[in-house]
Amino acid sequence: MNSLRKKIELIIFEADTFAGKLFDIILIISIAASVFVVMLDSVESYALRYGSFFIAAEWFFTVLFTMEYLLRLATVEKPLKYAGSFFGIIDFLAIIPSYAGLFFPGGKYLLVIRVLRVLRVFRVLKLAQYIGEAELLIKALRASRRKVIVFIFTVLTIVTIIGSAMYIIEGQENGFTSIPKSIYWAVVTLTTVGYGDISPQTSIGQALAAVVMILGFGIIAIPTGIVTAELTRAIGEQPHSRRTCPGCRNSRHEADARYCRLCGHLLP
């Protein structure tokens, strides 16, 4: 029994073996198919024509994912710890809406949360080699968070002032029925999205809108520049190997370097 449990655990939790990779691929295909079924079932014309098929398919996937979840709990060494982990919670949320739908109509559409489980695809694609780059990006985002927060508060202040001014200039007769709605217009205009559902009609309002549009071009580039600067700094601060080159005595090399970057000499 312990041997069987160990084999099942290797298949379910590891992607290094052929069986493990095959299990993950089948699981990912099943997840994508189940989400697709839920989406199609929300379309009224499809639901009327293929409703019985959608119900059968949904319960097939629900039973499949329930068995998978129970197998994970049965084979893992600490089932409670797994149940409280990120993927454990996602696994639970992936099956509970179907059962909840028996008591609460409409709850089945929460099944789209299954798409989060496709994050397991990273185990199959072996993206471990990109962990270093991801850590660099996270480090840059953390280093720039205070600057970005200050920038966001500055933008919020600007759109509040502009939205309030536009509410006074245009008024309710031109669609600016409240200050919050005017602030919404300012955000849409400043970010250069431009839905066009509200637009100024007076000359003063149009002049202010032109200023906001021009201002938007400069504002969008600021957070990008902040993060890029921190990312460049983080790359420059990457740890280097302390091996000294026998040829030129240079001691700064990349950790995986085999030859000196200055003279080409073989490193020890």
Image (cartoon, rainbow, N blue to C red):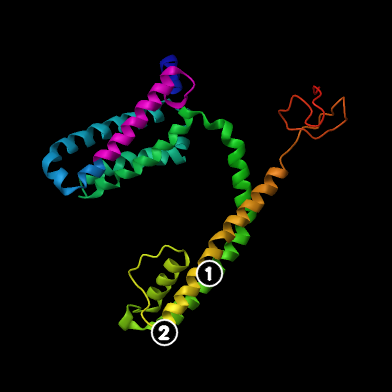
Vertical placement of residue 264 versus 89, above or below: above
Q: Quadrant of residue 167?
A: bottom left
Q: Quadrant of the N terminus?
A: top left
Q: Residues within 10 Å of mark 1 (few under 14, many from 20)?
A: some
Residue at the image point whose x is 42% and y is 78% from the top: 206
Instruction: Please indicate whether residue 203 sits to the left or right of residue 229 in the image.
Output: left
Three-letter amino acid code of the residue under disc 1? Leu
Instruction: Please indicate whether residue 268 sits to the left or right of residue 2 in the image.
Output: right
Q: Where is residue 160? Give x, y as percent.
A: 48, 75
Q: Where is residue 124? Give x, y as percent.
A: 46, 28
Q: Quadrant of the C terminus?
A: top right
Q: Which residues are magenta?
A: 12-37
Residue at the image point whose x is 44% and y is 33% from the top: 120
Which residue is label 1 attached to?
Answer: 215
Three-letter amino acid code of the residue under disc 2? Ile
Looking at the image, is mark 2 or mark 1 earlier in the sequence? 2
Q: Quadrant of residue 171?
A: bottom left
Instruction: Please indicate whether residue 192 sits to the left or right of residue 39 in the image.
Output: right
Q: Nearer the viewer, residue 112 or 157?
A: 157
Our reading of the magenta stretch's main secondary structure is: helix
Which residue is label 2 attached to?
Answer: 169
Q: Is residue 35 magenta?
A: yes
Q: Residues within 10 Å of mark 2 (few under 14, many from 20)?
A: some
Q: Nearer the viewer, residue 63 or 56?
A: 56
Vertical placement of residue 127 versus 231, above or below: above
Q: Is residue 186 magenta?
A: no
Q: Where is residue 241? Give x, y as percent.
A: 77, 32
